[in-house]
Image (cartoon, rainbow, N blue to C red):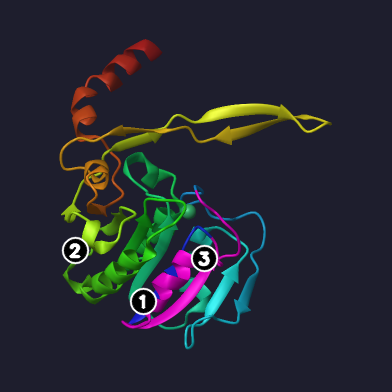
Amino acid sequence: MKILVTNDDGFYARGLWLLARELSKVGDVVIVAPDREQSAVASSMTLHHPLRVRKVRSALEGVPSYSVEGTPSDCVILALGRILTEKVDLVFSGINEGANLGDDVLLSGTVGAALQGYFKGIPSVAISVGAIKDIHFEVAAKLAGVLARKIGDIPREVLLNVNLPNLPLDKIKGIEVTKLGRRSFGDKVVEGNDGKREYYWIVRGEPQWQPSEGTDVKAFIEDKISITPLYTDLTSASALAKLKKLPRELLDNLK
Ligand code: MN
């Protein structure tokens, strides 16, 4: 089994290497990751300048590794389109430092990279641990290995977004398959002056949680591992019904 491993925390992030190490027990792993941190770039891709790829001496024997001057999505596109000549069976993105819950999935570079695998019809998994320091990567890495072995049982029409609480295995209260909840950040704009000019800095505020039943947010705050099957239809079925009359009204007002 050929496994592509990437992330959005950058080539030198610990979570990337722990993930690759565990997955290399399951299949042939190749790392293609951004050369620097690219958190919150979502699925953005680079179209307006060339991308350089560097083959880097790998910290893991038998795991070729490449660092890319681009986004997580760029990494997956380059890996699948050029760097890897064989068929890729699985794309793993992570292990991210920080949870990607609820509305985060639309901003997350970790999920963005997995989306590129999903777009190509390859089973893809984004995996994150909900902490930014003193991170327990070990359960996430182990779970990634277990999931990789079971990937044939996962429906092909989804990508998996996995979030773990930052706890050792004996403190984790279970694993739940969830739907996306609502978690948004009240982003703030901080203004300053660098001595020459004004600048603005976007700062992430405290997360606002809506821990409704059955959601990733609720599982996470209850110290459970959350696995959310994602697909990319963002259409609201309920609004579709409510907006039935809108085209007629708009048309009438255009006259
Ligand atoms: Mn990140």
Which amino acid type corresponds to the residue marked 1 in the rendered image? Answer: Glu
Location of residue 92 in the rendering, given as x and y in whole percent from the top left corner: 37, 67
**Quick check: is 38 in the magenta stretch?**
yes
Q: Are marks 3 and 1 in contact (CB under 8 Å)?
A: no
- Residue at 42% across / 71% down in the picture? 18
Classed neighbour count for the residue bearing mark 2: other residues with Cα under 10 Å, few (<14), some (14–19), many (≥20)? few
Local SS, label 2 = loop
Q: Can residue 56 be seen in this view?
A: yes
**Quick check: is 26 in the magenta stretch?**
yes
Q: Name the residue under label 3.
A: 75
Q: Mark 2 points at which residue?
A: 155
Classed neighbour count for the residue bearing mark 1: other residues with Cα under 10 Å, few (<14), some (14–19), many (≥20)? many
Which amino acid type corresponds to the residue marked 3 in the rendered image? Answer: Cys
- Pick out the residue farthest to the bottom: 62
How many discs appear? 3
Which amino acid type corresponds to the residue marked 2 in the rendered image? Answer: Pro
Measure the C-alpha gap from mark 3 to mark 1: 20 Å
Residue closest to the eye, 82 or 19: 19
Magenta span covers which residues?
10-39
Mark 3, ligand 1, within 8 Å: the answer is no
